[in-house]
Image (spheres, rainbow, N blue to C red):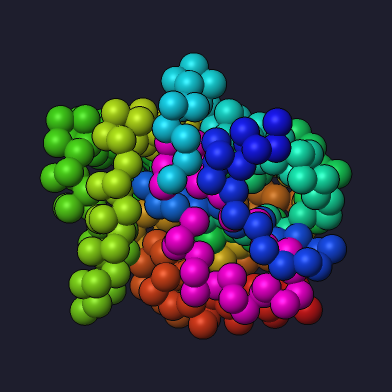
Amino acid sequence: MLEKLIKKNNVTIYGTSSKVMFFVHGYGCDQNMWRFITPHFKDSYKIVLIDLVGSGKSDENAYNYDKYNSLKGHADDIINICDALNLQDVCIVAHSVSAMIATLAAVKRPVLFKKIIMIGPSPRYINDADYFGGFSQKDIDELLETLDSNYLGWSSAMAPVIMGNLDRPELAAELEASFCQNNPEIATHFAKVTFLGDNRNDLKKLSTDTLIIQSKTDAIASIEVGQFVNNNISNSKLVVLETIGHCPHLSAPNKTIEAIKNYLM
């Protein structure tokens, strides 16, 4: 059972502390995206890293389109990994869409999780009445249509937008390469689940102590979205970093580490 789960999600574990820090990457990425962050916590925490099924070096054959037609499928995987490894009081660090995956896991099994650290979360990307998600329905439809018809072209065009920091093209190049390593069919399906989802009501069910790390300038999840997340979780704190882009753990790791350490003190 454990070996199967480790292969399925390419689980990496190191450190011997009884305290656990569990890292979950965002859309199109993998666990390598945390490489600047984890060394600063390995002496105080047992580090657990995964690749979401369908991403990175996970078992692509384990991707079930029915199961993963909702983020709950990935949330169940996280719960199963925690159970198999006998993890308790987990501090889960989750980027982008995985912030909502972590939310769903913590709502379903709150006893497992002591803290959630969200980086660039968004519960809903599409604008809706008085809610500002940052994108119109037309924006998202066009994005998904382009992704469906030309995944590699979409990856090349979107990576700089997502990453920001245009003066550091190596960052966008890394993100593009990460996108391109994934199966386009699976990536397109995961994108639809991500960008068409609505987890606003799930935030209100979350009781776990939560930190929201928000870049000041983020084309994917704006400050308004971060504020919405903060306002709809009963026990949360919002920290806005003086950073650009959706991936501050890559583009500004020192500021991200500082925010996490200040929260955990």
Which quadrant would the C terminus be assigned to in this image? bottom right
Res 65 quadrant in image:
top left
Residue lying farthest to the front in this orientation: 3
Magenta highlight on residue 37: yes
Rendered residue at 59%/48% (across/down): 11
Res 106 quadrant in image:
top right
Residue 122 visible at all: no
Which quadrant would the N terminus be assigned to in this image? top right
Magenta highlight on residue 24: no
First to last magenta residue range: 31-56
Q: Is residue 169 left or right of residue 15?
A: left
Rendered residue at 39%/74% (across/down): 251
Relative height, residue 261 to residue 67 (above, below): below
Residue 213 visible at all: yes
Residue lying farthest to the top in this orientation: 66
For the image, the number of numbered tags is 0
Rendered residue at 62%/79% (across/down): 40
Rendered residue at 23%/64% (across/down): 173
Q: Position of residue 122 (x, y in %)?
A: 50, 48
- 102, 9: nearer the viewer: 9
Q: Position of residue 79 (x, y in %)?
A: 71, 38
Q: Is residue 20 left or right of residue 78?
A: right
Q: Position of residue 38 (x, y in %)?
A: 59, 70
Res 154 quadrant in image:
top left
Relative height, residue 139 to residue 242 (above, below): above
- 161, 78: nearer the viewer: 78
Q: Position of residue 218 (x, y in %)?
A: 38, 63
